[in-house]
Image (spheres, rainbow, N blue to C red):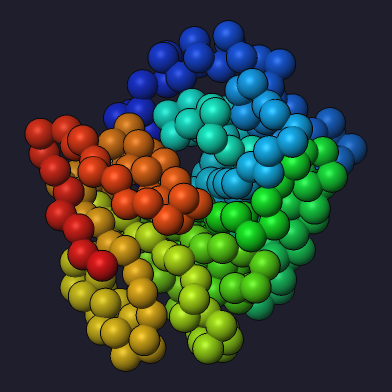
């Protein structure tokens, strides 16, 4: 199980940011599907926003979005998060069984449809993003529905295996994918990353892989880099990034 610690993320500063923008968020009432939906700051109804769908790691829940998005961007995106399909040790998770994959697919699609009814979302700029097991599921669903989602990003979650993740390979080749790997991870080894790189090459896929000098962690640098990558996909403009002193390596 891929478990990312939240310690490197300054939750106190994130909480302060959220407090000042509390009218922007909406957590679904209990009788609805458990989800969280955040509007961008200074929302402009005539602008079609990119949509970020965040899938939490095992043990988390949909409320994690309120800690994550202030460290990505509160201006650039409409964002939402849905609860994992099954109970985990201290929260919820994303089992990789056939039934649970279908359940995750349905849950995400329904939440996206609701977000598009509420906000002006660009239909070709919907990105699935997740941490740990949520990242693995985000990649799976992005590849399963490349005509529905613009791409997928995984932070600390390995590439999905089983249940034919590349069944729609001709279409999946146009998916934009980002994998952020923790160099000292105990659950996602460097050897496995190398095996996945060979798979991507053989499949003719284009994947951005970044490696960070840390263990199984979710850091502010990763979330900053995620924002930069997402905006590059939206604008088509590659920007120079400012990194903390310990810079991640990057391959395309």
Rendered residue at 60%/46% (across/down): 50
Rendered residue at 29%/84% (across/down): 201
Does 149 sit left or right of 99 as displayed?
left
Vertical comparison of 125 with 219: above or below? below
Vertical comparison of 104 with 244: above or below? below
Rendered residue at 68%/44% (across/down): 48
Which quadrant is the N terminus positioned in? Answer: bottom left
Q: Position of residue 93 (x, y in %)?
A: 58, 53
Rendered residue at 51%/87% (across/down): 169
Q: Position of residue 181 (x, y in %)?
A: 27, 56
Looking at the image, how many numbered discs can be counted on the residues? Answer: 0
Query: In this view of the protein, can residue 5 be seen by the observer?
Result: no
Q: Nearer the viewer, residue 2 or 113?
A: 113
Vertical comparison of 132 with 40: above or below? below
Does 65 sit left or right of 196 as displayed?
right
Q: Residue furthest right?
A: 31
Q: Position of residue 188 (x, y in %)?
A: 29, 62
């Amino acid at each position: 199980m891929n478990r990312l610690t939240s310690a490197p993320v300054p939750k106190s500063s994130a909480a302060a940011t959220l407090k000042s923008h509390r009218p922007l968020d909406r957590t679904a009432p209990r009788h609805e599907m458990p989800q969280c939906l955040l509007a961008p700051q200074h929302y402009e109804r005539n602008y079609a926003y990119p949509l970020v769908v965040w899938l939490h790691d095992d043990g988390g829940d949909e409320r994690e979005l309120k800690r994550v998005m202030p460290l990505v961007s509160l201006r650039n995106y409409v964002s939402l998060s849905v609860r994992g399909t099954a109970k985990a040790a201290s929260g919820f998770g994303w089992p990789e069984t056939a039934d649970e994959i279908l359940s995750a697919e349905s849950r995400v699609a329904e939440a996206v449809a609701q977000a598009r009814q509420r906000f002006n979302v660009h239909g070709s700029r919907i990105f699935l993003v997740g941490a740990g097991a949520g990242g693995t599921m985000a990649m799976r669903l992005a590849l399963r529905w490349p005509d529905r989602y613009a791409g997928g990003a995984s932070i600390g979650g390995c590439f999905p295996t089983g249940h034919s993740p590349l069944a729609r390979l001709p279409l999946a080749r146009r998916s934009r994918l980002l994998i952020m790997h923790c160099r000292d991870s105990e659950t996602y080894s460097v050897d496995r990353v190398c095996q996945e790189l060979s798979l991507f090459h053989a499949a003719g896929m284009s994947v951005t892989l970044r490696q960070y000098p840390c263990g199984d962690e979710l850091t502010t640098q990763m979330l900053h880099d995620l924002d930069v990558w997402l905006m590059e996909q939206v604008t088509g403009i590659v920007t120079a990034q400012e990194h903390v002193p310990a810079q991640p390596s990057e391959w395309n």
